[in-house]
Image (tube, grey):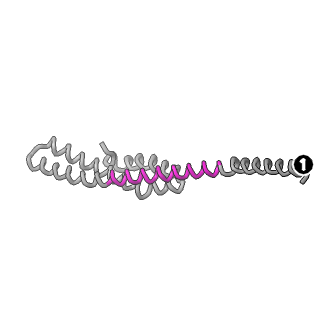
Amino acid sequence: MALGEIVAIVLGGVALIALVVAAAVYVLLPISRGLRRLLRHLWFIAKAMVQDTLRAVSAFIAAPVFATLGIVGLLTNRPDAQARFFASAKDESLRGLLATYRVFIGHPLRLIGAQRVVERLEQGLPPAIEDVWGEVLTPS
């Protein structure tokens, strides 16, 4: 084997290594960034769904407790306690409903990339509801 052939093989190997490195940088790096972003998005949605599920469960446990305490306040003729407990029961019920909405509608829409739809819904509904029913559905 001549010296020229050995040099050609070495230069070809170096060129092949450079091509593999360039392919890794220009192809694999964007793929890994996209995969990392996807996994981060999935983790955010899963974490938010678990938090909202726990929030809804705790609110739907607390609301009847507050309502019962409000009834006790009514029976014991304590209007200040009655009003406070019934307001707390209403607030907890609304927080539970809001968390349930996010679990079943908001987060799945965010998962498929409809963030703007969710934002528009969450910003447009409260004023419309307040226009129709006043502040009945607004937590204190």
Q: Residue furthest left?
A: 76
Counting from the top left corner in percent of width and height, residue 12 is at: 82, 51
Prevailing SS of the magenta stretch: helix
Pick the residue in front: 90 or 40.
40
Counting from the top left corner in percent of width and height, residue 41 is at: 51, 50
SS label for mark 1: helix
Q: Please give left or right for residue 16 compared with residue 134 in the image.
A: right
Counting from the top left corner in percent of width and height, residue 108 is at: 47, 57
Which residue corresponds to the image point at 65% horizontal and 49% vertical from the top-left? 30
Which region of the structure is painted magenta? Answer: 29-56
- Residue 42 shown in magenta: yes
Pick the residue in front: 18 or 10.
10
- Under mark 1, the amino acid is Leu
Which residue corresponds to the image point at 63% horizontal and 52% vertical from the top-left? 31
Pick the residue in front: 36 or 130.
36
Q: Residue furthest front?
A: 1
When asked about the image quadrant of residue 77, the answer is top left
Quadrant containing the C terminus is top left
Pick the residue in front: 77 or 1.
1
Circle 1 residue: 3
Which residue corresponds to the image point at 78% horizontal and 51% vertical from the top-left? 16
Counting from the top left corner in percent of width and height, residue 78 is at: 11, 43
Q: State the count of labels.
A: 1
- Residue 139 shown in magenta: no
Residues packed near mark 1 inside 10 Å, few (<14), some (14 to 19) or many (20 plus):
few
Which residue corresponds to the image point at 25% horizontal and 54% vertical from the top-left? 61
Q: Please give left or right for residue 119 compared with residue 51 in the image.
A: right
